[in-house]
Image (cartoon, rainbow, N blue to C red):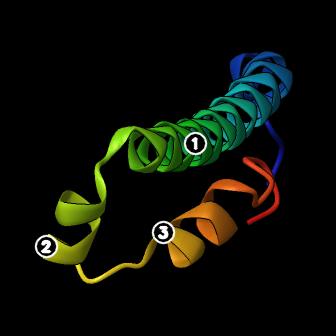
Amino acid sequence: MAMELSEILETPRDIVRSKMRRTARWGRRLLAVIEHRLEKRRSRRTLCELTDDELCDVGLTRAEAKAEISKSWFWS
């Protein structure tokens, strides 16, 4: 079965579109991961601002809060 000229010409375009979709999905996943890490960083900074009574309300000691705050924002 022979391919028509239109099928031959569309094939590279479809390949490019497929690669662009994969790249876009990868980019969205990467942005989601970075956003999640930054949210963890903001949460840890908020711990720094809490009083001892507020930390007690959430079930943390000052030492536990300091240990959490000292973690890397990116890797943990």
Q: CA distance from mark 1 to mark 3?
A: 17 Å
User: Which is more toward the observer, 13 or 28?
Assistant: 28
Q: Quadrant of residue 28?
A: top right
The three-letter code of the residue at mark 3 reads Arg
Residue 57, numbered label: 2
Check disc 2 and report its element: helix, strand or loop.
helix
Quickly name the residue at label 3.
Answer: 62
Check disc 3 and report its element: helix, strand or loop.
helix
Instruction: Specify the quadrant that holds the N terminus.
Output: bottom right
The three-letter code of the residue at mark 1 reads Arg
Point out residue 16 in the picture as x, y percentages from the top left corner: 80, 24
Q: Are marks 2 and 1 in contact (CB under 8 Å)?
A: no
Q: Quadrant of residue 71?
A: bottom right
Point out residue 45 in the picture as x, y percentages from the top left corner: 51, 39
Check disc 1 and report its element: helix, strand or loop.
helix
Is 47 on the left-hand or right-hand side of 20? left
Furthest residue to the bottom? 59
Quickly name the residue at label 1.
Answer: 41
Is 21 on the left-hand or right-hand side of 71? left
Furthest residue to the front? 52
The three-letter code of the residue at mark 2 reads Asp
Residue located at (53% from left, 36% from top): 35
Q: CA distance from mark 2 to mark 1?
A: 21 Å
Residue 8 versus residue 55 in the image, above or below: above
N-terminal-most mark, 3 or 2:
2
Task: Give neighbour class at mark 2: few <14, some 14-19, many 20+ (Cα, 10 Å).
Answer: few
Q: Nearer the viewer, mark 1 or mark 3?
A: 3
N-terminal-most mark, 2 or 1:
1
Q: Nearer the viewer, mark 2 or mark 1?
A: 2
